[in-house]
Image (cartoon, helix red, strand yellow):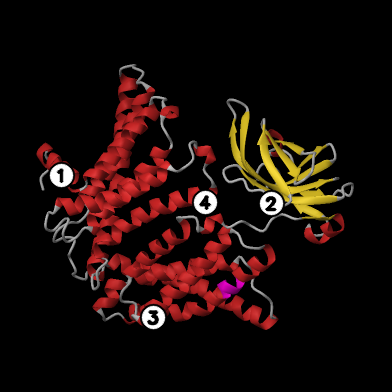
Amino acid sequence: MMFSPGAIAGSLYTVVRRFPVAVAALLAGAVLMLLVVHGHEDAIDYRWWVFLPAAMLASVAGVLAGVPAAEDRRSHVIGLIAELGVPLLWGVRCLFLPVTVNELTGPQWVEIGVVDGAGFVAIFFAPFLRRDTDAQWWNFSARLVVRLALGALFSGILFGGFLLAIHAVAELFRVDPPEELFGWLAVCCFIVFAPLYVMAGVPGGEAKQDGELRPRPVLKVLSLYILVPILAVYTSILYLYLFKIVLTWELPDGWVAWLVTTLAVGGLVVTLLLWPLRMRGGNRAAELLGRWTGVIIAPLLILMTVGIARRVSDYGLTPNRCYMLLLNVWFYGVYAWLFVVRGRRVKWIVVSAVVVALLSSVGPWSLARVNPRPADIVPLDMTERVMDGGEWFSSDNAVEANSIVPLDGNYSQFARIVWYRHSPEDSDRMTVTEQDGDLVIRPVGGERGFRLPLDRVTDSVTIRGDGFIFYVGACNGTRYPDSGTVEVNHIEGYLFFNN
């Protein structure tokens, strides 16, 4: 196609006609961003930022899922139903979110992130939920990934080119461009152009139904000669560790779960990348990897299960451990499925990941709502065992790493304190609230409280007060040097006190 204003207008018309709701959401987001550029962000309800990205992604996936009726037969009524359904449901859900963004809880942030991620990934498989469409799905996904990369590259080049032009005019003609001009340029390049360019390249019609297998040499090199050797090293390390714990008869470290996760995800990535080569036949290595990767990883998945179980036994359930355990179970299921189907129906790897993420994170049953084991108040004579020989090692980035804080013997009780600004949760023994820039810790049923100045915990290992001392274990937030203020978002540590 020749480059011309008419060709650009034709492509834009096609995008608007094919994805009207997505384009409307995109333009609404651009208008809101321009309001931010001009300093009116306080006038914008944050729920618009929650609603619009998911609405745009879900509407594109909805149009693609309307095949064959919505696109191939040009039935716009069915297409609009598919395009509007999920965005409207998400819009209703957004109405029930808190009024201000600071009131959002951790589980709600997780839900928002999962919905956005699921909407994006659903675009890749929405047209191919029928059987025997793996080849079409793979070609469609490969083209869409290339289009996304080109969209990011071209929008960056446009922004850099026009930014240089603005600076050139400013220097050569001694003019001072308004600051808002740079914001307008960023919105036009990244918020408007990039998504429209990607949507214009979403395969449709015959291109979307292309099922011819085309193994790509670059993916063969990436998979067989780069990723597979790296994963082989990981596998060797983990099997040596497995033999070690069997010989010494000790439980695995909980950190091993992350290594196994990296290996299992890498195995799935290699399986996806080698799929066309494996289906075409003739490459023994690709066929063996597709068939036996799950068998090789299975003992390590058991090691991962035991490692997670140990952490749960030692420290109780937390949202992170629940998600790791669910991921472990999903790995079992996916690799068992790939073994049964001989690595052929790989699109269900992606589909199942989205389904599991949505079911586990959206709704009152979300794993993000799991409450950690409450912090108990224990007699001081137990502190030597709990605090590793009477010394507390600070992990706060604002103080010297691994600084040693001596255990104080002047207090009768202590409690472990964990506080998150956006998802505060009280234990059954302590309440933690923010009052006038201080953190107030109060034993349940007690009359007195222990006040921690939040502007001091970022610079100190210990905070002393009347009848208490607080050892800072972790603290993070945001500093604002211009105003000399600090916003603390997360604190962990130990409070020693007397009743």
**Element assignment for label 3:** helix
**Residue extending farthest top:** 174
Viewer-nearest residue: 397 or 323:
323
Q: Position of residue 391 (x, y in %)?
A: 80, 54
In the picture provided, is 321 more to the left or to the right than 494?
left
Residue drawn at 51 percent across, 70 percent down: 328
Residue drawn at 58 percent across, 62 percent down: 321
**Element assignment for label 1:** helix
- The vertical placement of 85 against 309, above or below, is above
The residue indicated by pointer 2 is 427
Kind of residue sitting beneath label 2: Ser
- The label on residue 11 is 1
Q: Quadrant of the C terminus?
A: top right
Kind of residue sitting beneath label 3: Phe
Kind of residue sitting beneath label 4: Pro
Q: Are marks 3 and 1 in contact (CB under 8 Å)?
A: no
The residue indicated by pointer 4 is 107
Q: Nearer the viewer, mark 4 or mark 1?
A: 4
Q: Earlier in the sequence, mark 1 or mark 2?
A: 1
Categorize mark 3 by other alpha carbons within 10 Å: few (<14), some (14-19), many (20+). some
Q: Which residues are magenta?
A: 303-307
Q: Are marks 2 and 4 in contact (CB under 8 Å)?
A: no
The residue indicated by pointer 3 is 339
In the picture provided, is 289 more to the left or to the right than 455?
left
What is the CA distance from the residue labelled 4 to the residue labelled 1?
Answer: 40 Å
Q: Position of residue 76 (x, y in %)?
A: 15, 51
